[in-house]
Image: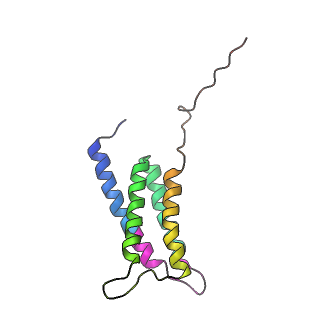
Amino acid sequence: MRTSILARILTGIVAVVIGGAYGLAGTIAHPFTLGVLPVGLVLAIVGSTALLVAIRLLTGDRWATLAAGLGMLLATLVFSGEGPGGSVIVPQTSLGIIWTFSVPLVVAVVVAWPERMSPAAKPVRSETID
């Protein structure tokens, strides 16, 4: 069944907004630690990955997943810079660098992951008897 163009456009818009929200939450939460454990970074990466995988599995569409990933990337980029008052949300620490590079890496892996083939769609080998 083919989806309409309007449905795909609306899905993309919603995916960008939700991806942006997850990217913003991860950008704000990534520096949180409990002792030496980077709890905020782990939760941000796991949450962002889970969102992208869920969108990919539920929609079966790479474009919706890419739209959510672009929303995450945009939020991370916008809020990683220096604010008007000189404040910085993502300082240049090891956690900040890991968060900055993990977002595009996760987006690329989830979007590029091969599609699952259903049993009905698998190619049938024809064996001929000579």
Q: Residue at x 32, y 88 (%)?
A: 85
**Which quadrant does the N terminus fall into?**
top left
Q: Is residue 115 magenta?
A: no
Q: Give the percent coordinates (x, y) of residue 62.
A: 44, 49
Q: Nearer the viewer, residue 12 or 120?
A: 12
Left or right of 112, for residue 76: left
Q: Furthest-left residue in view?
A: 6
Q: Nearer the viewer, residue 77 or 95?
A: 77
Callout count: 0
Q: Furthest-right residue in view?
A: 130
In this view, 117 is above or below 23: above
In this view, 40 is above or below 58: below
- Magenta-tinted stretch: 23-40
Q: Give the percent coordinates (x, y) of residue 55.
A: 43, 54
Q: Is residue 38 magenta?
A: yes
Q: Give the percent coordinates (x, y) of residue 14.
A: 32, 57
Q: Give the percent coordinates (x, y) of residue 77.
A: 40, 71
Q: Residue at x 33, y 63 (%)?
A: 17
**Which quadrant does the C terminus fall into?**
top right
Q: Say how the picture is coloured.
A: rainbow
Q: Residue at x 40, y 60 (%)?
A: 70
